[in-house]
Amino acid sequence: MESRTLRYRIGILALIIMAWLALVANAQEITGSFVGSVKDSTGAAIAGATVTITDAAKKAVVRLVTTNEEGLFSAPLLQPGVYDISVESPNFKKQVQRGIKLDLNQRRSVDMTMEVGNISEVVTVEASALAVETTTPTASSLIGGDQARELSLNNRNWVQLVALAPGVSNDLADQVYVGTTNPDGQANTINISVNGARQSQNTFTVDGADITDRGSNITIQAYPNIDSIGEFKVLRSLYPAESGRSGGGQVNVITRSGGSRFHGSAFEFLRNEVLNANNFLNNTATTPQFGRDSDGKAKRPPFRYNNFGWTLGGPIYLPKKYFGPIGFEKSKERLFFFFAQEFRRDRRYGAAGTATVPDSKLRNGVFPFPVCINRPALGEAACTGQYILPANTPIPANLYSPAAWGLSERHL
């Protein structure tokens, strides 16, 4: 009995460890980290210095770490964003670096040099927004949220932006419909090749969740709203261990979050045939596909596409008397929200064609060709002899079903 209980506990512990490892590996795909050193003006390491990392948008302290004996510190698993980093140590002036941008999957190095003085004195340095990647061999390209929102896209499909990365070739069609399939039942394939790999060897993730359609590997199952994307990174070669799902490109997308202030937006994008040039073949045809206008010019194919929506983000206020010790003022430093919604209206028309409708003879059961008026019994040959009604011969009245005849009368 005791051995069974022990095995049960070991099994539960193993499951917990596996789940924790999976969460850590998943978090590494959607986060970044700061590493660095703290030294004095002579280059000597400062041990025991307190490093405070503050999210500049949320005005919230997200990490407190202490330098080791060699003056080094590390702060992993941080959300991409802009941070302020301050360092304090006795007998040294407080050192602050503001506006340090941390990108998705980035391991950014931040080295601080402290000056001797009173700790109440503060030395502030504005950090460069850009930094050379020196801590990882991975070749990657970052597309920021501002770029995603401001670059022109013909159908607001964020996948098109992957083609901006070096070494990426694509054969993306004008997929007005966004999704795994379109209303015609055709697959919206993501035909992208990264560094010569097959188009089916890429992996796409959104906030760490794998959205690649593993049935085909060339379609994806989620299309985030462009305005909800914080940034995304295209890993092209020498991938880290946590990005080993496939041998092609690794595309990691993260969505936005709210900040310490309320912020929202609304947008509308449209495509219309009034703004389009005419199709060359339609424009030169003797009989244009969609006819001619009053000036005698060939009409353009109708195309009405509207993409519109809104976003809203900010802090969450929780009254203390209802939600315990968090408090009204403290809650806005810890809890944030972000909503985004998008609508699509697609009104297009197919090619003009000719349809044939039944004439008066057909509506009265007179066919211009021989027809079979009685199904052959099982095992008999095909319709022959008395079962064949000659062409242009009315169907005998006794063969009509009264219910069907009444239905046809009502429709006619």
Image (spheres, grey):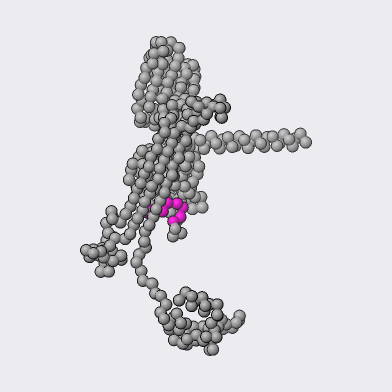
Q: Nearer the viewer, residue 117 or 17?
A: 117
Query: In the image, 273: left or right of 229?
Result: left
Q: Residue at x 48, y 39 (%)?
A: 207
Residue 48, relative to residue 276: is it above or below?
above
Q: Nearer the viewer, residue 164 or 236?
A: 164
Rendering coords of residue 363 (x, y %): 45, 80
Q: Quadrant of residue 43?
A: top left
Q: Is residue 104 on the magenta stretch? A: no
Q: Residue at x 38, y 42 (%)?
A: 266
Residue 272, relative to residue 122: is it above or below?
below
Rendering coords of residue 388 (x, y %): 51, 86
Residue 374, relative to residue 309: is it above or below?
below
Q: Is residue 177 on the magenta stretch? A: yes
Q: Which residues are magenta?
A: 173-182
Q: Residue at x 33, y 41 (%)?
A: 150
Q: Residue at x 47, y 84 (%)?
A: 370
